[in-house]
């Protein structure tokens, strides 16, 4: 199985840049985001977000992953969970900003694509900044366009995204990637595939050859219909 694995350091840098861009945009537009962003500095080495989790308590969450997410989930589940919470808070901030400026990001799937949301808002040819005359008209810094006033209350009335919805989706996606990362194809799968192809040339179809193969080497749904044997790769600290 082929997987694209991004370095956790690249992920950290990307999230840091997105957070910095979000701070700049919200500052210029005079908007107070749902979750406060604290950029990295002398007293805090990593960018973090501070806000309410599940409308219960205020918490600060870093956007920094100490190790690859798959390893972090196995070795330090608490840190992994807090990282997911931090990314979810950032995603909510971005979706909220976009919605306030007329780009209606109001579905969980769209909100989780945080980089694309910022690109659509600021860079795309059909971006809100170019096509929507109300871009920048509402904020928390002016009287005429004060977002919290009754006059502009309808602007955010239908915004339905919540932190827990985004966090659940991100957690579910990363858990799936963690499970997939624990599986790989054993070396003899390629040999078996070549043997079946040789029999096919001799007049035996691949389906017949696959039926005659051992059960562990028959086509698997995990391999997308190809012939191979999948096995779970034991982690270093996995005692099973």
Image (cartoon, rainbow, N blue to C red):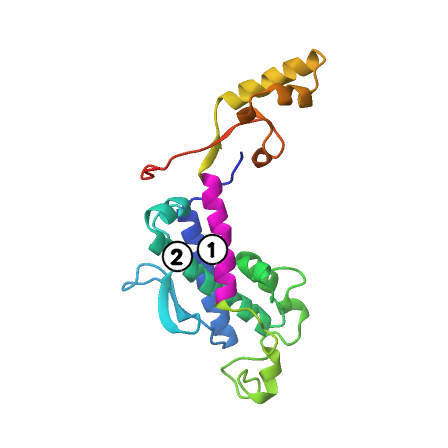
Badge 2 is on which residue?
A: 81
Q: Which picture quadrant has residue 96?
A: bottom right
- Please state which of residues 225 and 174 is positioned toward the viewer in this rendering: 225
Residue at the image point whose x is 46% and y is 40% from the top: 181
Residue 5 in the image, given as x and y percentages of width and height:
47, 41
Instruction: Tell me if residue 167 comes above or below residue 147 in the rendering.
Output: above
Extreme-right residue of the structure: 203
Q: Which residues are magenta?
A: 164-181
Query: Going by the image, does 176 lie left or right of 57?
Result: right
Q: Is residue 5 visible?
A: no
Q: Which mark is residue 19?
A: none
Residue 166: in magenta span = yes
Badge 1 is on which residue?
A: 171
Main SS, magenta residues: helix
Of helix, strand and loop, which one carries label 1? helix
Query: Going by the image, does 191 lie left or right of 76?
Result: right
Residue at the image point whose x is 47% and y is 36% from the top: 183
Of helix, strand and loop, which one carries label 2? helix
Extreme-left residue of the structure: 43
């Amino acid at each position: 199985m082929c997987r694209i694995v991004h370095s956790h350091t690249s992920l950290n840098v990307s999230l840091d840049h997105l957070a910095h861009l979000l701070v700049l945009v919200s500052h210029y537009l005079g908007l107070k985001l749902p979750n406060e962003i604290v950029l990295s500095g002398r007293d805090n080495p990593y960018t973090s977000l501070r806000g309410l989790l599940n409308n219960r308590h205020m918490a600060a969450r870093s956007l920094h992953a100490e190790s690859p997410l798959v390893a972090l989930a196995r070795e330090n589940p608490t840190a992994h969970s807090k990282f997911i919470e931090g990314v979810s808070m950032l995603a909510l901030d971005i979706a909220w900003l976009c919605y306030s400026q007329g780009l209606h990001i109001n579905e969980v799937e769209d909100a989780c694509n945080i980089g694309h949301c910022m690109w659509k808002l600021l860079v795309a040819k059909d971006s809100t900044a170019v096509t929507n005359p109300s871009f920048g008209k509402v904020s928390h810094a002016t009287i005429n366009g004060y977002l919290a006033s009754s006059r502009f209350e309808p602007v955010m009335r239908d915004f339905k995204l919540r932190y827990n919805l985004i966090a659940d989706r991100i957690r579910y996606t990363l858990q799936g990637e963690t499970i997939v990362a624990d599986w790989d194809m054993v070396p003899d799968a390629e040999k078996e595939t070549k043997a079946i192809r040789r029999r096919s040339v001799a007049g035996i179809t691949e389906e017949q050859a696959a039926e005659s193969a051992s059960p562990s080497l028959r086509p698997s749904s995990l391999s997308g219909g190809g012939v191979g044997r999948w096995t779970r790769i034991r982690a270093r600290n996995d005692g099973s």
